Image: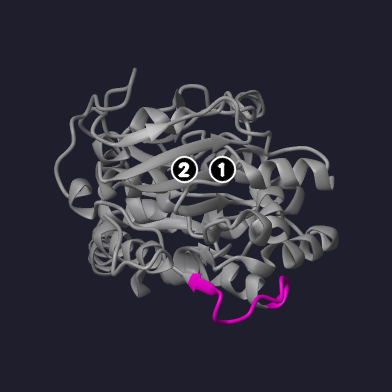
Amino acid sequence: MSTRILHLHSTFAAGGKELRCVQLINAFGPSVDHTIVSGEPESIGASHHVSSTACVTYPRDFPALRGRPWPGRLRTMAKAMQGYDLILTYNWGAMDAVLAHTLFSGAFKLPPLIHHEDGFNEDEQDRLKSSRNIYRRLALTRALRLVVPSRTLEKIALQAWAQPRSRVVMIPNGIDTAAFDHPQRPDALPGLVKREGDLWVGTLAGLRPVKNLPRLVRAFAALPEPWKLVIVGEGPEESAIRAEIARFGLADRVMLPGFAASPARFVGLFDIFALSSNSEQFPISVVEAMAAGLPVVAPAVGDIAGMVATENARYIAAPGDENALCQALTELVSDSARRAAIGAANRVRAQAGYDQETMIAAYRQLYGTAIGLEQLG
């Protein structure tokens, strides 16, 4: 008999936590049945990455994950959790479901629940909301485990959310590092061709305010030709980014090809990987860049400073320090040997610490133990 897992996501757009979920679904194979509910019912872009052999359904009649936390609504949501072997919830957008489970798990004999927290939206990037901290503490009372991918989030869970040490599990995100360790076609990005002599600073990010990509445009503006900036992604901040490009007269040196699937096909075309985010946790794009053998320039937000190789440490700038970000880029663009050495060290670190097989094994054991198995799948 198949194991039945209910996934309750804040959104199932093709972001970091959603694509990690897909990685795990594909790895667990057809012996596990997955039901996926999105708090934004139309945002299910990650579904396009699910293997054709995986058993996945997307019900349209599951109670809405968003709304006022009235007892009647929570009771209805809890009742809909019956009949599964394990419930997995993700981020703040699913916290009402976590509370519903805490309040009614006994009445409905619900299966164990494991909650995952991967980061925060713009409304909590600078400071956590005290009301949400209190809500999380209450909602997580009966959660079996709380999974986080970063030391920063682990500290928040233990301190701000007052979670017991036994409940909190830190599992770093992992990728197929071998997929990034090969030559890449110069036309791998839609509408772009990297020609001989071209040098690219590249980034991979949703075009959202928290990523602060206008800051990256400004930091890049001081770099000499033939360097170009390639911003891969889509989102609501595109017009603001283009306005900054126009303000600095960089229309012929900054390229926005839009969203591109399968980063392993093109990240290796970059010569330097850069981030300019106001907030991050454990950005998978940094791991991808490291696996591709790139040096990383980024602010020291989330776990970034501890993720990169020691050789890369000096190019991680203080949070919000635009001049330091520009200086780090300027130093690296003038030294190809240093770029190569740092990139090689990053690749070794990624392969040793952030390969997907390590991550998948940890989740197999975590989920399996929760339902009385040695491992899942």
Q: Residue furthest left?
A: 182
Q: Residues within 10 Å of mark 2 (few under 14, many from 20)?
A: many
Q: Nearer the viewer, residue 198 or 7?
A: 7
Left or right of 136: which side holds 315?
left
Q: Is residue 147 left or right of residue 139?
A: left
Q: Is residue 162 magenta?
A: yes
Residue drawn at (71%, 46%), measured in percent from left and top? 122
Identified at 25% across, 41% down, the residue is 30
- Rendering quarter of residue 312: bottom left
Amino acid type, residue under disc 1 in the picture: His
Would you call the spot at circle 1 few (<14 residues within 10 Å), some (14-19), or many (20 or more)?
Answer: many
User: Looking at the picture, does residue 227 appear above or below residue 179?
Assistant: above
Q: Any magenta on residue 211? A: no
Q: Which residues are magenta?
A: 159-169
Disc sitting over residue 9 in the figure: 1
Q: Nearer the viewer, residue 276 or 264?
A: 264
Q: Secondary structure under badge 1?
A: strand
Most foreground residue, 107 or 129? 107
Is residue 102 found left or right of 261 in the rendered image? right
| Label of residue 18 in the image | 2
Is mark 2 in CB contact (under 8 Å) with mark 1?
A: yes
What residue sits 48% from the left and 69% below the top?
A: 305
Which mark identifies residue 363?
none
Q: Main secondary structure of the magenta part?
A: loop
Rendered image quadrant of residue 66? top right
Is 92 drawn above or below residue 313 in the view shown? above
Placement of 277 over or under 60, stated as above or below: below
